[in-house]
Amino acid sequence: MNMEEQFPIWQYVTEEGELVQPEIDIDEAVSRAFYQYMSRARMMDQKCVNLQRQGRIGTYVPYEGQEAAQVGSALAIEDGDWMFPTYRDHAATMTHGQSLHNLLLYWRGRLEGSVPPEGKNIFPPAVPIASQLLHATGVAWAEKKKNSDRVSIVYFGDGATSEGDFHEGLNFASVFKTPTIFLNQNNGYAISVPVEKQMNSKTIAQKGLGYDIPSLRVDGNDILAVYYETRKAVERARRGDGPTLIEAVTWRYGAHTTADDPSKYRDQRESEERRSSTDPLMRLERFMRKQGWWSDAWKEDMEAGITEEINQALKDVDRHPRSEVDQLFDNVFAKPTWTIEKQRQHHTNINEGAKS
Amino acid sequence: MTTVAADVKKLTMIQAITDAMRTMLDEDDSVLVLGQDVGINGGVFRATEGLLNEFGEDRVIDTPLAESGIVGTSVGLAVNGFKPIAEMQFFGFIYPAFNQLMTHATRMRQRSLGRYTVPMVIRAPYGAGVKAPEIHSDSVEALFTHIPGLKVVTPSNGYDAKGLLIASIEDPDPVLFIEPMRCYRTGRTEVPAEKYTIELGKAKTVREGDDVTVLTWGAMVNDTMKAVEQWEKEHQATCDVIDLRTLYPLDRDTIKTSVEKTGRVVIVHEAPETGGVSGDILSVINDEALFYLKAPVQKVTGFDTPVPVYSLENEYLPSARKITWAIEEALHY
Ligand SMILES: Cc1ncc(C[n+]2csc(CCOP(=O)(O)OP(=O)(O)O)c2C)c(N)n1
Ligand SMILES: [Mg+2]
């Protein structure tokens, strides 16, 4: 059997909105919650792209098109579980409870933006590719040692699977049977490099075979598939049955970052075409319509509420005090060394024009 | 000074870097360019723009996303007849390759008593001040000048970049070639279309003066020049400003000659103070010109802190005010 047959892409809802896994427990309220979280993520993303264009935030990393993969998986964990996002996973973090305010601060180059709300365990976004897989494994290992039933979920892209840290993370998780969910978003590209050039393997899920980790592929634009399959993995991890590798097959519509020009390496018509075929929000809408759970008025109301929330967050962030210079020197150590204190003093003296 | 040849173009530093690679790909079939997004995308800074088209996929190679893989396989390619120019997308992402550099690339010659050699270049954009996201702005040259067996080169303008990069590619040993991002597109210099080299290990005096020696490199060269120009307008004293260009090995003679002349020294670098290359420069001064000093050597550096997120990077980087402050401290000691 070839790998694509061995690792089929699981769908719960077809592109036309047909439910093909009827045994699941889904109702109108849950569907609406799914849709609302995805809308919120998408509207925030579009807002950030605009803010970047206006120069009101720095370089930004959009995730439009990947909402189902991030929101569906984030909803499958609980408070107290651990989340390890990358720079592209703000849909996941905001769904798990990161505030829009902090997200905006993050993109304004502010340290406060990386701090999770009380009661949530969200790591600062990982920037060096694949490095976070090891933290997620270590944190889950600690939970296991403490006999808790907490789990960790770690996000990473297709390109990340080329780094050594990916393989080390999987192997450690396998050897120590840690409660870790490896949530891969295969969005087809690592900046300009398509997945077919990144690897010869036909799937990412098959890489779990080498480590004897249960692995599967899901349609990453089908929020039901992502949510229910991640939940199964979470339950297994909580039971003490170890890690799972989930490959969510998806697509980023836009640029890698606002500094990237995708037309250099791909035909953006494909993204346009996907907006009307595989889009995660459209898929859920079609499903809800078929179930008789859709209402245009509900959607409008909901979107108006989100717009208000985003605008309020932006207002608050605009009023947020500027970065304190002390942030530079604080928190490098529990207690600053003499070199840091000397540098801080010298910096202050010069800026105040005093003689040192 | 080179005489301006007929075929000279005004190039940005990034264009000069592309030009250097094109020149060498063209001249020498064993030269390869490899890294993340260096092919069709032309590199995230466009350093390899057009090279894929010109030289094809066998010579300009998009690799998997793995720095240890890129540097480790480059060691193998270099040992076996090729001259890889490996791009690290940002200097802050070179760390997975540290093992390959430290334990293999730089000691293969000695371990094999000269039988196996590693003529490779690693290029990496570095430095703060472009509002890049976290980790992208590290200035960790000193981690690498400390590696025995590695030369470390950093240009500050297009003309130097081309000559130094070609010299690095032709060097028989591994060279780390770090490119200050802030200099990529700020200003153009005249760059001859023909091939030329600038000897590694040679600094350049970019401004001549009598009273204070200011030693710097990378993006700090332009900042220092601006600060000094302004300062000299308002003061009676003048400065030698020296762009070191190669950080290992240091240009002992140029440092010595200037310090003997001025007796006063300021070192400017954006990397953290402790363990920075300033320590090695001080050591050269100590060994070569100690008794010429009329004042303690002044340092203007980054702090012993991580390079901050961008809202604070201007606080972190040496400012004109700090540079001129240090010049005055040296002068009025
Ligand atoms: C160690 C390291 N090398 C290089 C980079 C530069 N870089 C940032 S994102 C990226 C591509 C990542 O692709 P993928 O893992 O598929 O995630 P995606 O961006 O598609 O979400 C690269 C090469 C980095 N951040 N870290
Ligand atoms: Mg990707």
Image (tube, coloured by chain):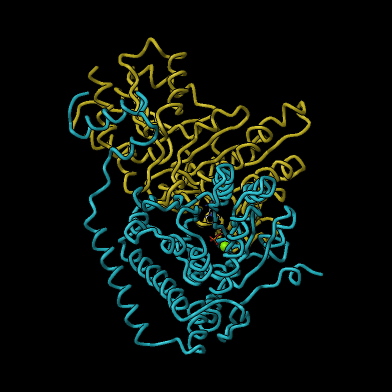
Picture quadrant of ligand 1? bottom right
x%, y% of residue B77? Answer: 73, 45
Quadrant assignment, res B150: top right
Q: Is residue B22 visible?
A: no
Going by the image, does B147 lie left or right of A67?
right
Q: Is residue A335 visible?
A: yes
Picture residue at 57% right of the left edge, 70% below the top: A228
Total labels: the figure holds 0
x%, y% of residue A215? Answer: 68, 62
x%, y% of residue B107? Answer: 69, 30
Quarter that holds the N terminus of chain A: bottom right
Task: Please tell me which residue lies in front, B288 or B94.
Answer: B94
Going by the image, does B82 lie left or right of A295?
right
Residue extending farthest to the right is A1
- Is the residue A118 above or below the residue A266 in the image? above
x%, y% of residue A147? Answer: 57, 45
Picture residue at 55% right of the left edge, 49% below the top: A136
Quadrant assignment, res A146: top right
Task: Please tell me which residue lies in front, B127 or B329.
Answer: B127
Look at chain A in the picture and name its colour.
Answer: cyan
Quadrant assignment, res B212: top left
Look at chain B in the picture and name its colour.
Answer: yellow
Picture residue at 45% right of the left edge, 86% below the top: A293
Task: Please tell me which residue lies in front, B77 or A39.
Answer: A39
- Is the residue B82 above or below the residue A69 in the image? above
Quarter that holds the C terminus of chain A: top left
- Is the residue A17 above or below the residue A323 in the image? below
